[in-house]
Amino acid sequence: MRRGVRLGVDVGRARVGVAASDAAGSLAMPVETVQRASDAPRALERVRELADEYAAVEIVVGLPLSLSGADTPSTQDARDFATLLAQGRTPVRLVDERMSTVTAQAGMRAAGRKAKRQRSVIDQAAAVVILQHALDAERGSGRPAGSVVENAQGEED
């Protein structure tokens, strides 16, 4: 298992959930929900700031696919966000995020949180699910989860 903090990102049209791992890459924890709807460039910049603040070695962006593995209306949005994010200093990977929001919502309900109160943290919880899945997959296989996102110059970060 590679050492270093990783950020997990759940890209939504209105909000972006962010999670971070510990330095050992064992445990994902919620960090922040970034508003995106009103200022998409600022949301991108805030995720980059968090990557710098946490000295992240990698950013893991969830790729929303349908249960069959096909693209959804949100798939290209997540890819576009990841591509722009990859223009920064921190390498970016896309990982399958099927069921992450559903899993996060179920966990919140099990913890006694009502749906209306979930909205402010559900994106963070989904980012935790995405990142924890990627960490567990890497620990199990010995290989990083997902695929590397190329930067604007066509180079892998």
Image (spheres, rainbow, N blue to C red):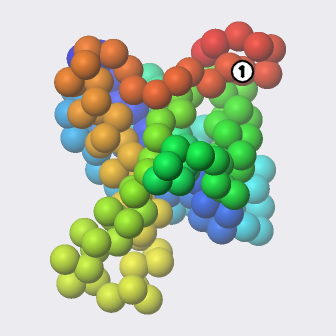
- Quick check: 90 left or right of 20? right
| Residue 61 showing in the rendered view | yes
Residue 108 location, quadrant: bottom left
Q: Is residue 138 left or right of residue 61?
A: left
Q: Compared with residue 58, is residue 47 higher up or lower down, i.e. above or below? A: below
At which x and y percent is residue 79? 67, 40
Q: Secondary structure at mark 1?
A: loop
Residue located beneath label 1 in the image: 151
At 25% from the left edge and 19% from the top edge, which residue is drawn? 141
For the C terminus, the image quarter is: top right
In this orientation, does residue 32 appear? no
Which x, y percent locates residue 123? 47, 63
Q: Is residue 105 left or right of residue 18?
A: left
Residue 86, horizontal then vertical, whole percent: 66, 28
Residue extending furthest toward the right: 153
Q: Nearer the viewer, residue 71 or 106?
A: 71
The local crowd at label 1, few if under 14, some if 14 to 19, many if 20 or more residues have their Cα within 10 Å, is: some
In the image, residue 49 above or below residue 102: above
Q: In the image shown, does 105 or 1 lie closer to the viewer?
A: 105
Residue sitting at x 46%, y 75%: 120
Residue 126's place in the image compared with 143, above or below, is below
Task: Check the image and name the residue furthest to the front.
Answer: 68
In the rendered image, the quadrant that contains the N terminus is top left
Q: Quadrant of residue 36?
A: bottom right
Amino acid beneath label 1: Asn
72 or 23, nearer to the observer: 72
Q: Is residue 57 above or below residue 62?
A: above
Residue 40 percent location from the top left of the image: 75, 56
Q: Residue at x 25, y 69 (%)?
A: 107
Q: Which residue is at a point 71% across and 50% down the rendered structure image?
A: 77
Q: How many marks?
A: 1
